[in-house]
Amino acid sequence: MTARQSTETTRAWQRMLSGRRLDLLDPSPLDIEIVDIAHGLARVARWNGQTSGAHIFSVAQHTLLVEAVMRQQTPRVDIRHRLAALLHDAPEYVIGDMISPFKAVLSGEYKAVEKRLLSAIHIRFGLPAILADEITQQIKAADRGAAYLEATHLAGFSQAEAKRLFGRDPELPEATERDYLTPWTAARAEKQFLERFKALHAS
C-alpha cells in the first residue's frame, strides 16, 4: 500500500448520533449540531475522572461553571462572549479532554486540530472564527477560576497548591458554588448545557 492509499483509507471522521459525519481534520460548520456537543461533553470526564462524587465531573458541567465564573468576574460582559465561554471546550465532544500536563508534552498537531474544530463551532453558532485577544483572556481567566474550584472541591488539591497552579478563588455565591461543584448525572449535565446554550444563543 502506498502512502497516498494509506492516507485515503485512514478514517478521520466521526459519525454523530444526530446522523452528522464530522471530519476531524477539516471540520465543516454544517456538520456541527449543538445536541451532539451537549451529549458528548456530558459524558467526558474532567481531571481524567479523578474527582470525588457519585458521578464524573463532566466537561459540560465545567463549561457551565466557567460561564458562571465569567459572569461573576465581569458582570457586564457581552452575552456573545458568555456564549463563547460556554463553548470554549466544545471540541472535546469529539477529541476528549486531555489534562494540561499531557498536552504540554504533545506536538502542536493536537492544538491545531482543536483550533480548527473550535473555529468551525464558532462559525456554526454565529461567533467569530477567532476571538479577540481580550475575550480569549477573559475566558482563560474564568477557566482558571473554575479549575481552582474544581481542584479544591473535587480533585484533592490543597488551596495553596491550587492557588499556585490556577490563581485565586473566584468567590462565587455559596449556593452557586455548591450546585455547580456537585457532580451531576450525564442526563442533567446535557440538559442544563442545552438550556444555557439556548438562552445565550437566542439573545
Image (tube, rainbow, N blue to C red):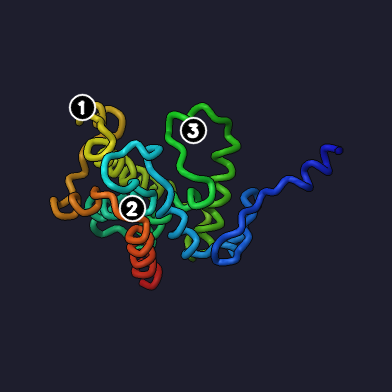
Q: Which residue is mark 1?
A: 160
Q: Residue furthest front?
A: 54
Q: Which residue is mark 2?
A: 61
The amino acid type of the residue labelled 3 equals Lys
Q: Is residue 119 left or right of residue 57?
A: right
Residue 94 location (% of width, % of height): 53, 50
Q: Earlier in the sequence, mark 2 or mark 1?
A: 2
Measuring 58% from the left and 34% from the top, which residue is drawn there? Answer: 108
Q: Nearer the viewer, residue 33 or 130?
A: 33
Q: Secondary structure at mark 2?
A: helix
Q: Is residue 115 left or right of residue 137?
A: right
Mark 2, Cα crowd under 10 Å, few <14 / some 14-19 / many 20+, is many
The amino acid type of the residue labelled 2 equals Gln
Q: Is residue 142 left or right of residue 40?
A: left
Q: Secondary structure at mark 3?
A: helix
Residue 53 lies in quadrant: top left
Image quarter where the N terminus lies is top right
Measure how far apart labels 3 and 1 are at the Cα level: 23 Å
Q: Which residue is mark 3?
A: 103
Measuring 40% from the left and 45% from the top, which residue is drawn there? Answer: 45
Measure how far apart labels 3 and 2 are at the Cα level: 21 Å
Residue 11 location (% of width, % of height): 70, 48
The amino acid type of the residue labelled 1 equals Ala
Residue 90 location (% of width, % of height): 46, 53
Q: Nearer the viewer, residue 44 or 54?
A: 54
Residue 67 location (% of width, % of height): 31, 54
Measure how far apart labels 2 and 1 are at the Cα level: 24 Å
Residue 137 lies in quadrant: top left
